[in-house]
């Protein structure tokens, strides 16, 4: 397991290097002079040249890239053009709301998807199963922003029981924190609930009629115990991978929802930085999100190898 972990950690280096190249090129190949876009149409040539020098834009692109990589390795993501604060500090300051939204959404996903899948498999020969397939397909197909608008209109305007904007840190009160985050967290979780419940239900149905479950029933083991010990545990291994990608998907979904619900997280920071043409912050946020994706996938791979030892020997 240790060798497998080391191999996976080493494999992160080329992945992050390629990601950094893509992030750098996307920002720097965007049409227009960043210094001119930041300063506006009334700016003088001298002020544009000064800002270009400050941002290092007067150097060849290759040198700019390796300077940026060198600073990243030392933990320096640059300074915001808008606020002059270190980018890393800005990202850390905005990560709390995003992390809260992700964790609450993940809890909702696990609390709803897993019991639903188990119950559907338990009642697999009833009308509940086709109903579940239809609902889960609907949940996966609905765009997040459209579902969010529906819930805002329903529970924020027509029946105003939830706030539709704002964020209260958990340190200022757990109840207020939950009250403000519950609606966006449910929207964020809706798609993933359908995906994971469907995945777990399919995996469990594959195991229901396997030889080991028939043997367990032949020995007189109760159906509920067969379902949980032999069927659920085997279906949980492939579902773990989907749960990992779910965490990454939740992070991506926060970009839209934080903007809609005015939550001051990473997604809101990214949108604001794009509007301000704050290129160092844009680069830092995109790279930070990519790093979270890579780390989540690493944890999933390690967990997968822990649950199924055959993986680590491949």
Image (cartoon, rainbow, N blue to C red):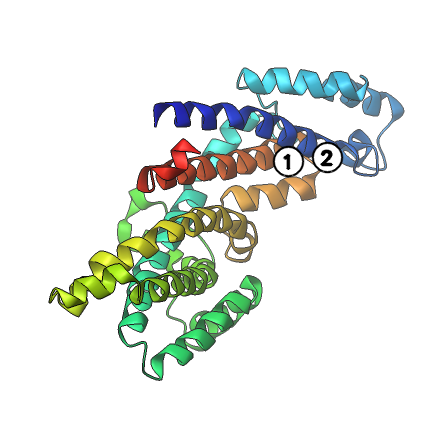
Point 58% across, 24% down: residue: 77
For the image shown, how many numbered marks are present on the structure?
Answer: 2
Q: Nearer the viewer, residue 168 or 216?
A: 216
> Tag 2's secondary structure?
helix
Residue 193 locus on image (x, y percent): 41, 62
Residue 227 visible? The answer is no
Q: Residue furthest right?
A: 45
Quadrant including the C terminus:
top left
Please indicate whether residue 282 sits to the left or right of residue 196 in the image. right
Residue 125 visible? The answer is yes
Tell me the distance, in whole angstroms, between the alpha carbons under discs 1 and 2. 8 Å
> Tag 1's secondary structure?
helix
- From the image, tell me which residue sits under label 2: 27
Point 33% across, 66% down: residue: 117
Label at residue 120:
none
Please indicate whether residue 193 sits to the left or right of residue 272 in the image. left
Residue 176 locus on image (x, y percent): 32, 54
- From the image, tell me which residue sits under label 1: 282
Quarter holding residue 171: top left
Residue 26 locus on image (x, y percent): 73, 36
- Disc 1 residue crowd, few under 14, some 14–19, many 20+, Cα 10 Å: many
Q: Are marks 1 and 2 in contact (CB under 8 Å)?
A: yes
Please indicate whether residue 289 sits to the left or right of residue 29 in the image. left
Quarter holding residue 309: top left
Q: Along the polypeptide, which appears first: circle 1 or circle 2?
A: 2
Residue 308 locus on image (x, y percent): 34, 42
Q: Residue furthest bottom?
A: 127
Image height of 268 relative to 1, above or below: below
Quadrant including the N terminus:
top left
Image height of 278 relative to 181, above or below: above
Q: Residue furthest left?
A: 220
């Amino acid at each position: 397991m240790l060798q497998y972990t080391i191999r996976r950690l080493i494999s992160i280096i080329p992945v992050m290097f390629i990601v950094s190249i893509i992030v750098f090129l996307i920002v720097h190949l965007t049409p227009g002079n960043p210094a001119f876009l930041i300063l506006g149409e009334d700016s003088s040539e001298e002020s544009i040249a000064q800002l270009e020098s400050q941002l290092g834009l007067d150097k060849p692109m290759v040198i700019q890239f390796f300077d940026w990589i060198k600073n990243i390795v030392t933990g320096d993501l640059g300074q915001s053009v808008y606020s002059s604060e270190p980018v890393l500090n800005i990202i850390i300051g905005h990560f709390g709301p995003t992390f809260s939204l992700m964790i609450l959404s993940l809890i909702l996903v696990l609390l709803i998807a897993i019991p639903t899948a188990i119950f559907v498999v338990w009642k697999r020969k009833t009308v509940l199963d086709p109903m579940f397939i239809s609902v889960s397909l609907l949940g996966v197909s609905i765009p997040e922003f459209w579902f969010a608008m529906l819930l805002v209109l329903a529970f924020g305007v027509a029946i105003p029981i939830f706030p539709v904007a704002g964020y209260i840190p958990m340190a200022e009160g757990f109840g207020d924190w939950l009250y403000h985050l519950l609606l966006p967290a449910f929207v964020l979780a809706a798609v993933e609930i359908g995906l994971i419940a469907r995945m777990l239900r399919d995996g469990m149905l594959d195991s229901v009629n396997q030889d080991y479950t028939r043997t367990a029933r032949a020995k007189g083991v109760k159906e509920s115990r067969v379902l949980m010990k032999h069927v659920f545990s085997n279906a949980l291994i492939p579902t773990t991978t989907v749960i990992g990608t779910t965490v990454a998907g939740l992070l991506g979904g926060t970009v839209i929802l934080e903007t809609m619900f005015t939550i001051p997280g990473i997604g809101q920071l990214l949108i604001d930085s794009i509007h301000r043409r704050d290129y160092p912050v844009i680069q830092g946020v995109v790279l930070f999100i990519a790093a979270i994706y890579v780390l989540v996938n690493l944890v999933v791979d390690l967990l997968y190898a822990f649950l199924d030892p055959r993986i680590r020997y491949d």
